[in-house]
Image (cartoon, rainbow, N blue to C red):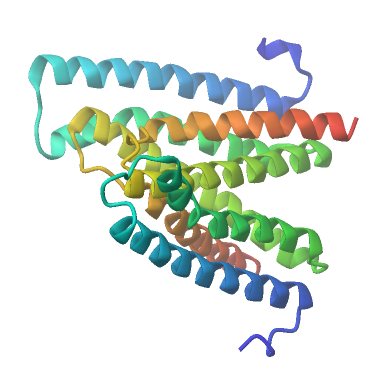
Amino acid sequence: MFCSIKSPALRRYLIRVSIMTALCFLISVVAALVFQFFLPHDPHGALAYLAAVLPALPVIGALVYTGVYLAEEKDEFQRYLLVQSLLGGTGGILAVLTAWGNMEDIANAPHLDLIYVYPLFWVFAGISYHLVKTRYR
Amino acid sequence: MLCSTSNPAQRRYMRRFLVAMLLYILFLFLAVWIFVHYRPVGPMAWILAVLPALAIIGQIAAFGLYLDEEKDEFQVAVGVQSMLWGIGGTLAVTVTWGFLENFVHLRHLDLILVYPLFCLLSGIAFGLLQLRFR
């Protein structure tokens, strides 16, 4: 799957992000099992906080690798495309969160789980990527 | 304050930012006042609640316009880099907080704090980048 990608920096990035995604799923399952079987009566101790934070570390790793990819990518146009889509994603996610936050606070809207912020950011970044790419086609 | 900079793009950005800020204060007061006095429900309540957020979205759009209009490439690069650091930090905080909320039932992070958090982290990154390139 990765062999067809010509840019070595992009190939490295996709492999790293795939590993981080797999790690996130694996650690989430392990953390859930730890909470189910080892911490059912003490969900607020130091071990509980550690187990809760661990699944977030691969996500932070994926963010760091996005930065590393931006530094390693030699094709300026690809770098420009990614930066533009990340900025689009930033604007989109901040707009949605601020609007939803106001609706939660003022109009008692249902609570948005923060776990969805990261995937939602990439949805907006993906939409921006295609829009910017279409613009320069 | 607006006149202290000779850069027209920065001056326009400051003006748009201030207008959006004033609109935010106005819309927030208006929304809260209507909720306290008339207690609207349904779609009307949702529209009213979103009203102050529109001003914040205007602020984000104003910064996007500034990046597009700014002729000084160095300023654009620093602005873009600080935004990227800001969103990276914000996503790291929200995802960690999200797992803590789900697993150890940490109190819910008020979503309206995410934008100020992003501004704070971008501001710190902006300062550090200016120092690095000085």
Q: Quadrant of the N terminus of chain A?
A: bottom right
Check the image and report above or below for A17 versus B17: below
Give left or right: position of A16 versus B48: right
Q: Quadrant of residue B43?
A: top left
The image quarter containing residue A44 is: top left
Observer-nearest of B109 and B12: B109
Residue with the most extreme right position: B134
Task: Name which residue lies at 43% across and 42% down.
Answer: B97
Residue A95, percent from left and from top: 42, 41
- The residue located at (78%, 78%) in the rendering is A8
Instruction: Give how far across and how far down residue A46 sits, in percent.
Output: 45, 41
Q: Residue at x 68, y 29 (%)?
A: B124
* Residue at left offset 40%, top offset 47%: A48
Question: Quadrant of residue A63 in the image?
Answer: bottom right
The mark total stands at 0
Q: Quadrant of the C terminus of chain A?
A: bottom right
Choose between B63 and B12: the one closer to the eye.
Answer: B63
B3 and A25: which is toward the camera: A25
